[in-house]
Amino acid sequence: MKKFLNLLLIIGYLFLLGACGKENKRIIRIAHNQIQTHPTNIGLLAFEEFIESKLGDKYDVQIFPNELLGSQVNTVELTQTGAIDFVVASNAILESFDNIYQIFNLPYLFNSTEHYHAVMDNAELIEPIFTSTEKSGFEAVTWLDAGQRSFYTKKPINTPDDLKGLKIRVQQGATNIRMMELFGGSATPMGLAEVYTALQQGVIDGAENNELSLTTTKHGEVAKFYSYDMHQMVPDILIGNVKFLNGLSSEEREIFNEGFKLLSKVQRGAWEASVEQAKLQAQNEMNVQFIYPDVALFKEKVLPLHGEVLNNNPKLKPIYDKVQEIGKNVKEGGNI
């Protein structure tokens, strides 16, 4: 009941915003859960500028960062209804709408960043995944780099044994919960906005995410050890309301598609520099210690999950095989 009332309040808020919009222009609302200096917001600003330069007489693009319109779960639901037009969603949330998205949550699926990017840029492989949620009212339109995911905790993690008994925040999704079980920890799913307080109050002992989480959400203030086990490389996904997308003319859709490509390019271009900046800030201003454990020990614990998921979800096998094939053909920039 509380969740339903929250959604009604957000929809009411959006209605009021619409009433204040620029006259005769269709407002396009885009929500995400990052701060304004994050690469995702930088990419979205480039998208906004591009769309308005081409179609500004008809569309007014408005970006709502920092979970202003609600949690990722809420904003995905609002995108289904059309109250929001686009939202940047985690792959873990999308897994609950179609289990084809399980493929990207598999730990150690990719051998390198180059392998990861080559797979995500393979339109033939990715398009059926992106359109799998049409019946749910939305589809994916592009992917955004979210780097690698590793553990950050209140005590050093040098081997998987150090995770035993620890409550670790993971993204929602059955695959992530099972992964944490195999590592030996206790999975605690929760929204990103809840993590700081949960760490501060001892509700959880740590979390797993990329380096930017230490600084953009200030988790480095309350978790002083970042262990590079690099168990996942998982994209964030921009999803759009199907009714809105299908209502675009062919010329408009072509312009939007160009905008989606620009968004991804700008966001990914800003990512690497942002990671290096975050590491320096975390070390120098937050006294975060970066640890480089033996990754092989962590791989050994969770690779059986590949077989479990493929056995339970046979439609993933052709995708998985193609991912492995692409990996063999990519010049690796370094193994994980």
Image (cartoon, helix red, strand yellow):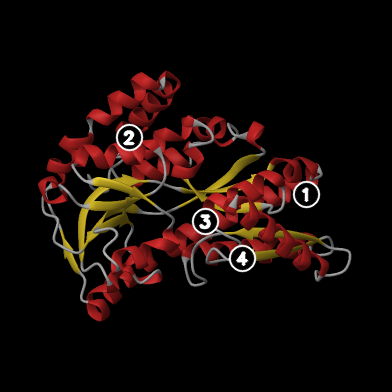
* Residue 329 percent coordinates (x, y): 33, 33
- Which secondary structure, mark 4? strand
3D distance between C-alphas at marks 4 and 1: 23 Å
Label 3 or label 4, whichever comes before in sequence order: 4
Mark 4–mark 2 CB contact (< 8 Å) = no
Q: At 74% from the left edge and 65% from the top edge, which residue is drawn?
A: 53
In screen coordinates, is 124 left or right of 317? Answer: right
Label 2 or label 1, whichever comes before in sequence order: 1
Label 4 or label 2, whichever comes before in sequence order: 4
**Which quadrant of the structure image shows residue 11?**
bottom right
Structural crowding at the residue carrying mark 2, measured as other residues with C-alpha within 10 Å and reported as few (<14), some (14–19) or many (≥20): many
- Which secondary structure, mark 2? helix
Q: Which amino acid does label 1 sit on?
A: Glu
Instruction: Tell me the tag on residue 64.
Output: 4
Task: Give the labeled residue for mark 2.
Answer: 327
Q: At 47% from the left edge and 30% from the top edge, which residue is drawn?
A: 99
- Which secondary structure, mark 1? helix
* Residue 323 percent coordinates (x, y): 38, 31
Q: Nearer the viewer, mark 4 or mark 2?
A: 4
Structural crowding at the residue carrying mark 4, measured as other residues with C-alpha within 10 Å and reported as few (<14), some (14–19) or many (≥20): some
3D distance between C-alphas at marks 4 and 2: 36 Å
Q: Which of marks 4 and 1 is in front?
A: 4
Q: What residue type is labelled 4?
A: Phe
- Is the residue 165 above or below the residue 58 in the image? above
Q: At 40% from the left edge and 53% from the top edge, which residue is drawn?
A: 190
Task: Give the labeled residue for mark 3.
Answer: 265
In screen coordinates, is 156 left or right of 117? Answer: left
3D distance between C-alphas at marks 3 and 4: 20 Å
